[in-house]
Image (cartoon, rainbow, N blue to C red):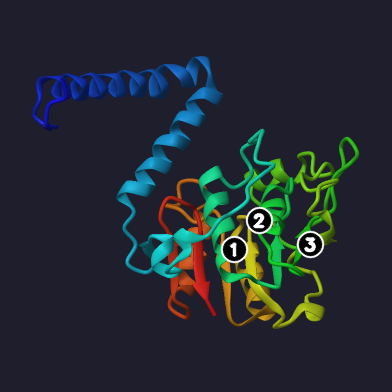
Amino acid sequence: MAKKFSKLSLERICLGVNRYFGAAAASFRHLFLSPLLNRKSANRFCFGVLSLNDEISYDCPLIKQVEVQELFPGIEKEVIEVGQVLPWEGSSISAFEVINLAAIIQHLKPQRVFEIGTSKGVTAYNLALNLPEGGQLLTLDLPPATEAGAEISTKFDVTASDTKMIFADRVNRRFLGTSVESRITQLYGDSAAFDYSPYEKSCDVVFVDGSHAYEYVKSDTDSALRIVKSGGWIIWHDYNDGFFWPEVRRYLKEVSGSMKIYRIKGTMFAIARI
């Protein structure tokens, strides 16, 4: 027999108490034991806890957090395509971010999108997959480091997390050999020294996901402002509470006085219409 739902039922109370002590035990294990026995596990636990805390406790008056449908009314009706997200290797946008980004692209129907920071091509694949007929994606990245011990020169210093991505396998992009490869133009160069002049004021959407160092975030934002159309959108990835990429947060808070920036709830996307 099904009875009317009650928050104060004994079953619900016992389940809640069990969850509470389970979470407390997991926190003790990963915060105090895992750092000694399994640092990778401890790091993943901290990442998850801080990401969850950022989502439920976010409070920045300069960059308001909103649901994606508040920015794009009717976006919930969009039918999207998603692919090439597995295996998730940690440096790409999350599955929920892929869904949000794909829906934004389907909703806006941009003819030209510019991505700064290709990495392994997961975002590029899903951007291109949701472009309208005739849509084009330009994606810029440093040349891959194909030789052991290779060094890549950059205009500004990069962060430690950047170097991990720079020297990852960026040759086997996820979009290569797929049905959307023809929609994608791969560009190579240092984003702080790249010649953007052929693309000025021609892009409907610019997705900034390059280096997390302050000088690069500033430079990439300046470049995005050069190439985006009036009325177009800039989307930054890796904006959060600052535990992971504090320079991204610091710069966007500084520049929020000159443009209205929002944070999309449940993601690490900051977004502004220019």
Rendered image quadrant of residue 224: bottom right
Distance from Cα at disc 2 to Cα at disc 3: 10 Å
Which quadrant of the figure contains the N terminus?
top left
Q: Please give the label number shown on residue 190.
A: 3
Quick one: SS at disc 2? loop
Quarter of the figure with the C terminus = bottom right
Q: Earlier in the sequence, mark 1 or mark 3?
A: 1
Question: Is residue 184 at all visible to an observer of this figure?
Answer: no
Neighbor class of circle 1 (other Cα within 10 Å; few <14, some 14-19, many 20+) is many
Q: CA distance from mark 1 to mark 3?
A: 29 Å
Q: Is residue 274 above or below residue 20?
A: below
Q: Of the residues tagged 1 and 3, which is closer to the observer?
A: 1
Q: Pointer 2: residues within 10 angstroms few (<14), some, or many (20+)?
A: many
In the drawing, what numbered circle is on residue 211? 2
Considering depth in this image, is 176 or 4 the residue closer to the camera? 4
Give SS at disc 1. helix
Which residue is farthest right?
A: 147
Q: Is residue 175 above or below residue 155?
A: above
- The amino acid pointed to by label 2 is Ser
Residue annotated with mark 1 = 106
- In depth, the one of 123 and 144 nearer the eye is 123
The amino acid at mark 3 is Asp
